[in-house]
Image (cartoon, rainbow, N blue to C red):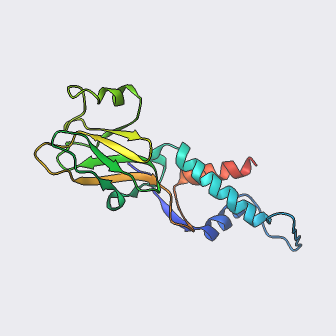
Amino acid sequence: MPAFSYTLSESELIARLRRLLFMEPVDESVSRTDSPGALRRMELQVADAYIDGLISLDPSELPLTDLTPEAVLSNPLPGQPATLILPPRCLRPVSVRMAGWGRDATIVKAGTAVALAQDNPFSRGGTARPVAVVEPAGKLTLYTPPRNLAPSLLTLLAIALPPDGLYPLTQPLEHHILSRLASR
């Protein structure tokens, strides 16, 4: 089950993190012209820590995005693997299901033992235990669509880059960002 998520704008997130890190405003001001200001530097650090969290944390601790409408599914021959072209903002697919499958596919990286077993038609995944192999260049190879149905993608849930200026968050992701900022 995915973690509870909430969305903050960039300014709301920065203000919240500044309060949590005890970076209270003071009466004095300092201006510099030789480098970005402290606020701009913090914005860059927050963006960096956010992306790091999306890549490194467990998917159950992250906000998931439904990318089904943005994905493009190839039309394979009956009984052959299908190729799903992932949207550019997809960082990690978490769950994929096609019509006719009994459950979500097991998602594995290319080159693993399970991925290599998909080359053999007798050991490859089917409708009862489907497998999705993450390929380079933003593709998923789906083993194997049902023979009697036209390939149809039901769901694609993924960890994805958010629209500019918005930060979908969970408590573990916010904690990750805070710990990264506090360690600098």
Is residue 20 visible to us here?
A: no
42 displayed left or right of 59: right
On the question of residue 37 being in view, the answer is yes
The correct choice, above or below, for 41 with respect to 99 in the image is: below
Front residue (pair 26, 126)? 126
Residue depicted at 70% across the width and 63% down the height = 19
Residue at 79%, 64% in the rendered image? 36
Q: Of all residues shown, which one is farthest toward the left?
A: 148
Say above or below: 125 vs 156.
Answer: above
Residue 60, horizontal then vertical, whole percent: 44, 46
Q: Is residue 51 above or below residue 164?
A: above
Q: Is 179 situated left or right of 118 in this image?
A: right
Q: Position of residue 134 (x, y in %)?
A: 39, 40
* Residue at figure coordinates x 73%, y 65% from the top left: 40
- What's the residue at 87%, 69% (across, down)? 33
Picture coordinates of residue 54, whole percent (x, y): 53, 50
Asked which quadrant contains residue 174, the reply is bottom right
**How many numbered dots are placed on residues in this image?**
0
Left of 126 or right of it: where is 18?
Answer: right
Residue 73 % position (x, y):
28, 53
Q: Is residue 110 left or right of residue 80?
A: right
Question: In the image, is residue 6 above or below residue 174?
Answer: below
